[in-house]
Image: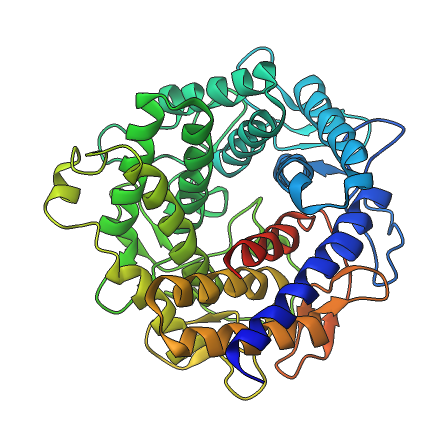
Amino acid sequence: MNQHDDATLIRQEIDEILRTKIIPFWLQRSVDEVYGGYLTSFDENGRADGKTDKYIVTQCRMVWGFSHLLPYADVADRPAMLAAAGQGVKFLIDRFWDNRHGGFAWQVARNGTVLDSAKLVYGESFAIYAFSEYFLQTGDRAALHYAERTFDLLQVHAADTLNGGYYENLEADWSRSPGGFAAGDRKSLDIHMHLMEAFTTLYQATQKDIHRRKLSEVVCLILRHMVNREAGYGYNQFDAAFNKLPAININRTWNAERETNETIGEPTDTTSYGHNVELSWLMGLALQVLEQQPGALAEDGAAAAGLVDRVILQRLLDHSLQFGYDHEFGGVYRDGVADQKVLVTDKEWWQNFESLVGYLNGYRQYGQSAYWAAFVQTWRFVKEKFLNLAVGESRQLLDRRGTPIVANLGNPWKGIYHTGRALAECLDRL
């Protein structure tokens, strides 16, 4: 079979799985008909597992997913998807929004009672992302208002005007959280990458100069401080002045709450192969959106000096293939240390779905056959090992060979976002 036939077959497979498996899985299960918002915790058979607390990140990702995936769904499913997204927006505004201090709380109970009122920039970024996308699909200006309001609050309360970037972990009143496990003294590539993602969609929605400028700033900050541009990998955690710090588990993060099969041990300067590949395509999208406005990046002095170099987007892919890719069984490993041997050979769903997009995007942009081969091999591993096609979603965590370690199909952090988005982005590129 030649490459064209491979691409045609894979596109057909992805289209069918997205339309008839992923979207229906969440549409039939996730909407909370009693209280509003979404239930996201489901076992390997697709049954609710009793975990009903709602996190701002996952609730927003569900709004984003039901909005963005409308054009990819069966026509018969689209009215229900619009309704699912709309009620999610309402629940977020009614239950998560802080009427005193502004911004969205981190966690509520199923009925909307606030359990954790902290303001995490990670959560606020996904509110911007979701509400902007909902506006793009529906024209709902009330949703766009909350996206812009949240953006404005970040500039007032979270922006570090001395060092650049944003403080990431804040309390209900926007004061910085304590240091250490609460991480009020740390910044990370993860959160700034997702701010870039959110600001990209916000700028697409508003076309406002302030949103373009802040998107450009985040792009340049990531390139200046958060990645090794020569070797092609991202660093993990930093102090306020962007001095690199050994990575630790941080409260209210996936790393701290995930079910795992291993212990890395002492804090270390790890890199996430999946994040690096995800960064490659997300930054490529941000640059594409910015370049629609002539001179957008040249206004930043560092960018004008050559900081924004698309070669780094290739180097992120090349590093992952050299150090973080399983060329025997397929798929991306979890974590490693820079240019050393991989630390964790388990494979997580989000990293592998995002890598599908990254490698395919790399092939489309740069024509390197290694990227196409990695895409095809990763797709086969995803289809055969991650996806539970009998039920309709991806398992969470596998060992190197693809044996399930955590077989659940949804949890408080896992919704439609990574799986649905990755398949949609692959369809566009195929």
Indicate the quadrant containing the N terminus: top left, top right, bottom left or bottom right. bottom right
Q: Quadrant of residue 350?
A: bottom right
Foreground pick, 280 / 43: 280
Q: Quadrant of residue 156?
A: top left
Foreground pick, 293 / 133: 293
> Which residue is farthest left?
305
Residue at position x 72%, y 29% from top? 88
Q: Give left or right: position of 25 versus 217.
A: right
Q: Is residue 80 visible?
A: yes
Q: Give coordinates of residue 423: x percent, y percent.
A: 62, 57
Residue at position x 36%, y 60% from top? 246
Q: Give coordinates of residue 182: x percent, y percent.
A: 49, 42
Above or below, 24 against 258 in this view is: above
Residue at position x 49%, y 47% from top? 181
Q: Give coordinates of residue 198: x percent, y percent.
A: 46, 36
Residue at position x 71%, y 76% from top? 384
Q: Give left or right: position of 430 versus 367.
A: right
Q: Give left or right: position of 319 versus 385.
A: left
Above or below, 309 against 336 in this view is: above
